[in-house]
Image (cartoon, grey):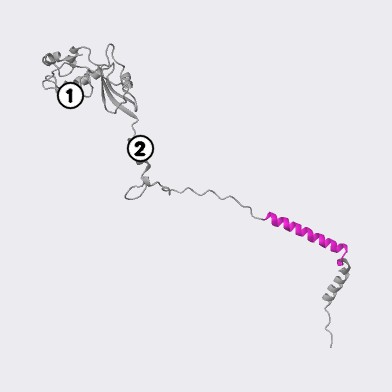
């Protein structure tokens, strides 16, 4: 068989490899250099791979959830729809159940009779003190100064009997009334005094710090000489 001729380029490559073969032999400087380069490449690759690892990042906090709370107490649900009631309705009901102040009417033998507003839990003694105290030479009467005030009540200082009970009267003004302690209902029992005039007498009394003389009745609108003559013997101060 005839052999195929070797191309000149392949022959040149084989000659170059054969010339370098001694440099690649074990223990030669060329092989050591290749091993060193390979070691360096492995180290560099490891460092790069270690630095290329992803770093964990903290997750952002979840956005606030709008709407009614999932743990709405059963007491805040309406009995029919089951929907939460508004906070304003709840706060309004709580405020309506608790009084912060009380308003009372202090009249009688005090220096400044009138309507007074005091903190809840105050006593009758506080109301009398807020009205200027008892007038000089007068007594508080049967009042219990230690009793707590009730909103809307009337306190008559110096009354001869229980302030809340007016004695029944068969005839007009069978007793002499104290102008500074008599209630509007009692004043209506005076001759010629109706609801409107009784209210005017009380308004004058509250606006002037009480009556100092019976003759001051002349200054009340609606009381003329004739009516004053009819009632002056049935009242006193």
Q: Nearer the viewer, residue 194 or 72?
A: 72
Secondary element at image label 1: helix
Q: SS of the residue at dot 2?
A: helix
**Residue 85 x %, y %:** 36, 45
Q: Residue at x 82, y 59 (%)?
A: 36
- Upstream in sequence: badge 2 or badge 1: 2
Which label is found at residue 94? 2
Which quarter of the figure has residue 24? bottom right
For the stretch drawn in magenta, the main secondary structure is helix
Which residue is under mark 1?
185
Farthest residue in the bottom direction? 1
Q: Is residue 41 above or below residue 105?
A: below
Residue, x 38% and y 42% (percent of image)? 87
Q: Which residues are magenta?
A: 24-52
Q: Is 17 above or below relative to 96?
A: below
| 10 Å crowding of disc 2: few (<14), some (14-19), many (20+) | few
> Within the magenta stretch, is there residue 65?
no
Separation of residues labelled 2 and 1 (CA atoms): 37 Å
Image quarter in which the C terminus is found: top left
- Measuring from the top left, give residue 54's x and y in whole percent: 64, 55
């Amino acid at each position: 068989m005839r052999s195929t001729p070797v191309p000149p380029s392949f022959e040149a490559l084989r000659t170059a490899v054969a010339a370098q073969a001694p440099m690649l032999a074990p223990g030669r400087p060329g092989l050591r250099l290749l091993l060193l380069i390979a070691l360096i490449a492995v180290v560099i690759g490891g460092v790069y791979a270690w630095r290329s690892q992803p770093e964990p990042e903290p997750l952002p906090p979840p956005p606030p959830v709008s709407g009614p709370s999932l743990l709405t107490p059963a007491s805040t649900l309406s009995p029919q729809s089951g929907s939460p009631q508004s906070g304003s309705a709840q706060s309004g009901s709580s405020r309506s159940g608790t009084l912060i102040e009380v308003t009372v009417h202090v009249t009688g033998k005090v220096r400044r009779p009138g309507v007074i507003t005091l903190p809840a839990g105050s006593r009758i003694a506080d109301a009398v003190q807020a009205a200027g105290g008892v007038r000089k030479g007068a007594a508080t009467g049967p009042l219990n100064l230690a009793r707590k005030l009730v909103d809307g009540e009337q306190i008559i200082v110096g009354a001869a009997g229980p302030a809340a009970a007016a004695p029944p009267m068969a005839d007009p003004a069978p007793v002499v009334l104290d102008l500074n302690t008599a209630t509007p209902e009692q004043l209506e029992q005076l001759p010629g005094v109706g609801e409107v005039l009784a209210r005017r007498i009380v308004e004058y009394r509250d606006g002037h710090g009480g009556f100092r003389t019976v003759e001051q009745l002349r200054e009340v609108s609606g009381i003329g000489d004739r009516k004053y003559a009819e009632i002056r013997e049935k009242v006193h101060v």
